[in-house]
Image (cartoon, rainbow, N blue to C red):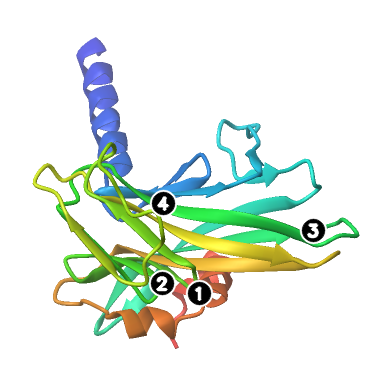
Amino acid sequence: MRGLVLGCFLFLCAILTRAEDTPGSLQRIDGGFAPRGASFEVVFEFSDLKLEQGKEGLASEWSGPNGVIAHLEVCCVKWPLGLSDGMLAGARLRLTNPTANPVHTTLSARIVPQGKILALAFERHAFLVEGRPILVSDTPSRGAILADSPFSSRPLIPQDRAHVESAKGECRGEMLFDLTLPPGQTQTLGFISPVQLPPASEPDLDFYRELSVDKLFAEAQKPEAEKQQKP
């Protein structure tokens, strides 16, 4: 009997371990997200807003002495890609200025290696690895700064197009946004990241440009029964 209980326990542990390590699921991190099984994570950081400690150990809100508040939402949804379905992540950063004065801030959307990134490129407000988009912004940026290691020299001015390579797989980059919020106004920035693509399906940058981040969130918020209904 004791052996049977132990065997069931080990079997359950194996199932849970496989579920946690399944590529394509989305992992929340402080101020960003990371697709499980991917070689990178996405981290958002503001120049003058402080990331608040979350009650459940994960932080997704920023605040500043000028009264500006920023909130991050992240979703992961199944989406048709060619003849099959893939998994896409959507991220929305919503900034609110409740004050009576305009507020200026700078946002950095960083790609940080969580494995090896041998080559990283930036163009048209998107990061790409081996020609495949990994983070696409729906808002024009000031450009990006790329580096081939944490301590290497890097350009002081963001570039519209850039490319770096690293034999050690330490490529990283940050996309910069200069934001001005009028008094009492809210601004939302959206980002799309492919989490898991079906075989033989490589959507190009134009595909993600035409896809609305709000549509991803609308799909994520549908009841499960409605998602499973066939058209």
Query: What's the residue at 28%, 44% (across, down)?
Result: 153
In the image, is residue 97 above or below residue 81?
above
Mark 1 or mark 2, which is nearer the start of the sequence? Answer: 2
Q: Position of residue 82 (x, y in %)?
A: 26, 84
Q: Position of residue 176 (x, y in %)?
A: 48, 60
Q: Position of residue 63 (x, y in %)?
A: 72, 43
Q: Disc 3 versus disc 1: distance between alpha carbons?
A: 20 Å
Q: Disc 2 versus disc 1: distance between alpha carbons?
A: 6 Å
* Disc number placed over residue 110 in the picture, else none: 4
Quadrant where the C terminus is found in the figure: bottom left
Q: Are marks 1 and 4 in contact (CB under 8 Å)?
A: no
Q: Are marks 2 and 3 in contact (CB under 8 Å)?
A: no
Query: What's the residue at 33%, 55% (across, down)?
Result: 155
Total marks shown come to 4
Mark 3 secondary-structure assignment: loop
Circle 4 residues within 10 Å: few <14, some 14–19, many ≥20: many
Q: Which residue is mark 1?
A: 140
Circle 2 residues within 10 Å: few <14, some 14–19, many ≥20: many
Name the amino acid, label 3: Asn
Quarter location, residue 164: bottom left
Answer yes or no: is residue 26 visible: no
Q: Are marks 3 and 1 in contact (CB under 8 Å)?
A: no
Q: Which residue is mark 3?
A: 97
Mark 2 secondary-structure assignment: loop
Q: What is the residue that sits farthest to the bottom in this orientation?
A: 231
* Disc number placed over residue 125 in the picture, else none: 2
Viewer-side residue, 71 vs 225? 71
- Left of 138 or right of it: where is 79? left
